[in-house]
């Protein structure tokens, strides 16, 4: 079972509403894209931050920074504005390639999610329009390339 599948199962088991974003979402929409970390967004509710923290621990992942779910939820805006902390990162110390970044700048409730299938698993993925918007806002060279690829996919689907 892949790390993405294990992550999805853990988040679903802990009832964390989420969507995959970032490079994995770009690839799941059909673009050729390599990435190591898995980026997700969740709802900005304390309950969901606490559930996410439990799911990460169940997978053997721990925050890179010594902050708890409660602290991230309570000080999210301050962390973004004063520390430029846009993602709450988790890593597996036993398998450092297993990395999850929880974006703190996007609330799941404000975005459209589509279901993609990986084997028998249904995976919530950010819809292509919202993913393009998110990538444009990020504006890094890889994000601009992702936007071009996603726009080509969107155009071909019409």
Image (tube, helix red, strand yellow):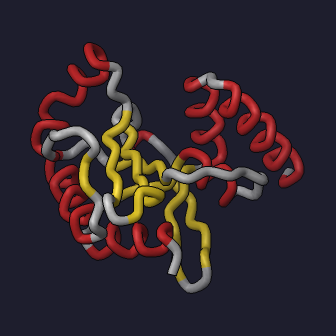
In this rendering, the count of numbered labels is 0
* The quarter of the displayed image where residue 83 is located: top left
Residue that appears at 61% across and 74% down:
117
As rendered, which of 80 and 42 lies closer to the eye?
Answer: 80
Residue 86, percent from left and from top: 37, 30
Q: In the picture provided, is 65 more to the left or to the right than 114?
A: left
Residue 50, percent from left and from top: 16, 54
Residue 128, percent from left and from top: 65, 47
Q: In the picture provided, is 15 more to the left or to the right than 25?
A: left
Q: In the picture provided, is 88 more to the left or to the right than 111?
A: left
Residue that appears at 13% across and 44% down:
68
* The quarter of the displayed image where residue 92 is located: bottom left
Location of residue 118 with respect to 71 vertically, above or below: below
Q: In the picture provided, is 10 more to the left or to the right than 78?
A: right
Location of residue 68 with respect to 54 vertically, above or below: above
Residue farthest toward the top in the current orientation of the protein:
82
Residue 24, percent from left and from top: 60, 54
Residue that appears at 27% across and 61% down:
56
């Amino acid at each position: 079972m892949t790390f993405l599948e294990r992550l999805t199962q853990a988040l679903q088991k802990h009832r964390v509403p989420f969507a995959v974003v970032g490079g994995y979402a770009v690839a799941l929409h059909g673009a050729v894209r390599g990435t190591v970390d898995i980026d997700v967004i969740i709802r900005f509710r304390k309950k969901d931050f606490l559930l996410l923290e439990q799911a990460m621990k169940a997978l053997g992942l721990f925050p890179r920074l010594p902050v708890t779910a409660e602290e991230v939820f309570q000080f999210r805006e301050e962390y973004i504005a004063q520390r430029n902390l846009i993602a709450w990162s988790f890593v597996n110390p036993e398998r450092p390639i297993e990395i999850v970044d929880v974006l703190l700048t996007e609330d799941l409730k404000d975005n459209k999610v589509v279901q993609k299938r990986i084997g028998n698993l249904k995976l919530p993925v950010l819809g292509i329009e919202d993913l393009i918007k998110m990538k444009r806002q990020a504006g890094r060279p890889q994000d601009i390339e992702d936007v071009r690829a996603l726009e080509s996919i969107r155009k071909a689907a019409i």
